[in-house]
Image: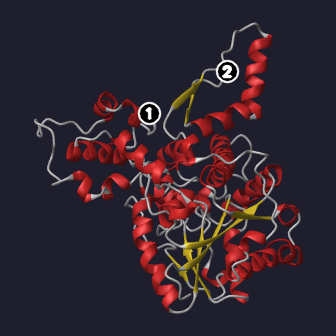
Amino acid sequence: MSNSKPKVVVIMGATGSGKSRLAIDLASQFPIEIINADSMQVYKGLDVITNKVPVHDQKGVPHHLLGTISPMVEFTAKDFRDYAIPLIHEITSRNHLPVIVGGTNYYIQALVSQFLLDDSVGDADERFLGDGQLHIQDQENFSYSYDNLKHLDPVAANRIHPNDHRKINNYLHLYASSGVLPSKYLQEKTMENWGSTDSLRFECCFICVDASLPVIDKYVEHRVDQMVDSGLLLEVYDIFNPDADYTRGLRQAIGVREFEDFLKVYRSEELEILCVEKSKENVNTILSSCDENPHKRLLQDAIDKVKLNTRRLVRRQKRRINRLQTLFGWNIHYVDATECLSGFSDELWTAKVVEPSIQIIKSFFDKDINSVSDSNPTNGTKSLTLIERDLWTQHVCKPCGNKVLRGAYEWEQHRQGRSHRKRVCRLRKSGVPVLDE
């Protein structure tokens, strides 16, 4: 712990894979403190929807950034980094081991990398930006809009969503302050620093709790049902506001917006004849009501949407972890929880997940981490050099409904995907010419 760079353990993986449980179990072998890296669990409230570890299951292990942030603010990757770095130094000063746990991989990237890709414009080097004054003539009429960004720098505009106002503002502020196009500045910095293992802020031991997609799909669907039984509907009822912004803060969580259609109908009808508390109380009885209940179908559709969006999240998280290893060379060690999620038992969990993780961490402290064998589900994908990285070029897949992919790696992964290949094959069989480049 006395090295210039603190040692940290990072536990990654898709939602539902068992990251939090593993971290707590590691406390039996190491003096650990956990820093939560889940972008929704950092907020106060919605404990069931965000699947926070209850206090009685934390087994006395200190947890940081778990349910501490106001649900009304936007807690960015930069915010997470700025909160977590001092925490890591405090934990190591107590001779404890910081363990970063969460599925929000851009939080983890922001923390361990010396360079913050998307929020870097807010931290741009002062020598590069000069005096910080606007370098445009008509300051008052300068528009911080997506259309203006697209006009000034279409390359930068292509890589963000038109409604991502925070990044739009950051990119245009960089241009206004320096006269340099965001794409030029960020591409140069990205190629030089972003994600490189040579420039990580800490000595990192990366562990990924992995599981096969069919098994984890089934597991997370069952977990959604358990969340409904545990009070999810009451949490959604309390936070519902038809005029709310679902793109900021805690309302972004999967399990909130999916119930909007149901609650608009339910509350507009039920509140006419019932008091608020009675109406809230009746929410939990709808699923057990007769099929003729007009609210039941809406509610079941909402629950199905939660399951669908959770399955999609699992796939995004797995792709991003693979990308960290393939593009940036992160040495990620995989522990396979497939058997454990199929038929959970404490013995199987200990043998398949906990004990291998303990050995990985011990080897990490013994400086032998590169010799640890692990199952690496990269599907034969070759590592890319810095020169081969392309994070900016926009690709549009017409066979898949004009789906937008950003960067050569994401495009290639999409092209190799089963659903894309099936669509292309189906179109070609029907005689439709398909350009698949």
Q: Residues within 10 Å of mark 2 (few under 14, many from 20)?
A: few
- Image coordinates for residue 333, horizontal then vertical, percent: 73, 65
Residue 432 seen in this snapshot: yes
| Vertical comparison of 406 with 303: above or below | above
- Which residue is painted at 25% across and 46% down in the image? 173
Amino acid at circle 2: Asp
Q: Indicate which disc residue 138 carries.
A: none
> Position of 6 compared to 303: left or right?
left
Image quadrant where one finds the N terminus = bottom right
- Which residue is painted at 64% across and 59% down in the image? 284
- Image coordinates for residue 363, horizontal then vertical, percent: 74, 79
- Image coordinates for residue 315, horizontal then vertical, percent: 68, 47
Q: Which residue is mark 2?
A: 436
Residue 272 seen in this snapshot: no
Furthest residue to the top?
431
Q: Indicate which disc residue 158 carries.
A: 1
Q: Closest to the observer: 4 or 37? A: 4
Q: Secondary structure at mark 1?
A: helix
Residue at mark 1 to residue at mark 2: CA–CA distance:
20 Å
